[in-house]
Image (cartoon, rainbow, N blue to C red):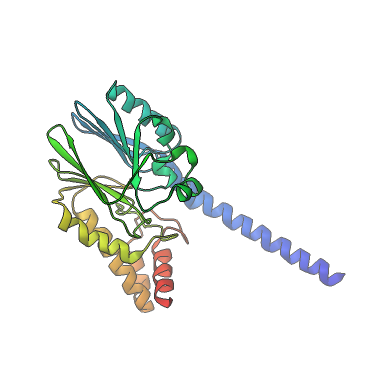
């Protein structure tokens, strides 16, 4: 009986410590990160292109005489505001929604576009999407490879990466005249990636090498973070190179991890340390 009481006492202490640790992690890292992610910045890039940073994943509204394209539909209140703005711009014109991937911070507003076309990568299945995202955000069409859409004096290319990168079917969107690439979470600006599920470091590197071969890029709109130039891709590429070096040689870890201390991150989940752990796990298999 004494042993049982002692065991229960220590179990209670361990649970309490875990609760305190979880609460500390939330208050110090997760809560500020979520608040930052929910904050919105609207960029009127030109008369037909509006870029909305934050409120979930970065989004855009591209207007033309015959069609309005929305890239990613955000989450929570930001999703509803994006839908309202899009419908106001569209009037009676059809709306095409493009989901760069299935994560809810990029697809939470799909439900506000009932009756419109919603496209996502063709490597997902209906069952997977409903389980991992939601039934109400389900796309109406699946893109197998590539699609070109004429939008006024510009051409928009939707390109399904069709292999494991951030997810198993990320779509990127390229505006030819503007030489602008919307990458979803395949490229982030000063934010560590989450390498879970089907996310594959080799896929990220493949995508980073593929983009300049496919597109003439001058502007990048990442899945999260500010708009910038080709340096965003270069910085993200260097991140993976550095984390691989740290995974291969523990003596380099502290120095290489310190390079990214200013990046947005959450310990154990979305951080240099988490990336190194994922690379070591991949190498072990």
- Residue 281 location (% of width, % of height): 44, 72
| In the foreground, 175 or 138 | 138
Residue drawn 46% across the image and 35% down it: 76
| In the foreground, 126 or 137 | 126
Q: Is residue 256 left or right of residue 213?
A: right
Look at the picture and state if 272 lies above or below 175. Answer: below
Residue drawn 39% across the image and 75% down it: 283
| In the foreground, 211 or 14 | 211
Quadrant occupied by the C terminus: bottom left
Q: Residue furthest right?
A: 1
Look at the picture and state if 196 lies above or below 281. Answer: above
Q: Is residue 30 left or right of residue 258?
A: right
Look at the picture and state if 150 lies above or below 260. Answer: above
Residue drawn 72% across the image and 64% down it: 11
- Residue 151 location (% of width, % of height): 18, 34
- Residue 27 location (% of width, % of height): 52, 49
| In the foreground, 19 or 59 | 59
Residue 254 figure quarter: bottom left
Residue drawn 67% across the image and 63% down it: 14
Q: How many marks?
A: 0
Q: Is residue 8 visible?
A: yes
Quadrant occupied by the N terminus: bottom right
- Residue 4 location (% of width, % of height): 82, 69
Q: Is residue 52 visible?
A: no
Q: Is residue 276 left or right of residue 229?
A: right
């Amino acid at each position: 009986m004494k042993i049982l009481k002692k065991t229960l006492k220590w179990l209670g202490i361990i649970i309490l410590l875990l609760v305190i640790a979880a609460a500390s992690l939330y208050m110090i890292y997760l809560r500020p990160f979520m608040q930052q992610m929910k904050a919105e910045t609207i960029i009127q890039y030109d008369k037909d292109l509006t870029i909305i940073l934050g409120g979930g994943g970065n989004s855009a509204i591209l207007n033309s005489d015959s069609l309005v394209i929305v890239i990613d539909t955000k989450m929570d209140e930001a999703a509803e505001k994006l839908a309202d703005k899009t419908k106001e711009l569209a009037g009676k014109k059809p709306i095409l929604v493009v989901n760069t991937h299935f994560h809810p911070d990029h697809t939470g507003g799909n439900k506000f576009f009932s009756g419109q076309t919603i496209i996502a990568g063709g490597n997902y299945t209906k069952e997977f999407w409903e389980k991992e995202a939601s039934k109400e955000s389900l796309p109406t069409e699946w893109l197998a490879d590539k699609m070109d859409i004429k939008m006024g004096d510009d051409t928009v290319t939707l390109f399904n990466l069709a292999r494991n990168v951030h997810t198993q079917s990320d779509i990127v969107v390229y505006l030819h005249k503007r030489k602008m690439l919307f990458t979803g979470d395949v490229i982030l600006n000063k934010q560590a990636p989450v390498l879970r599920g089907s996310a594959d470091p080799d896929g990220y590197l493949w995508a980073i090498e593929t983009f300049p071969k496919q597109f003439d890029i001058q502007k990048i709109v990442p899945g999260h973070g500010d708009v910038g130039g080709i340096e965003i891709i270069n910085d993200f590429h260097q991140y993976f190179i550095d984390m691989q070096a740290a995974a291969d040689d523990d003596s380099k870890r502290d120095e290489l991890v310190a390079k990214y201390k200013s990046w947005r991150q959450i310990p154990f989940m979305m951080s240099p340390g988490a990336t190194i752990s994922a690379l070591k796990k991949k190498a072990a298999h």
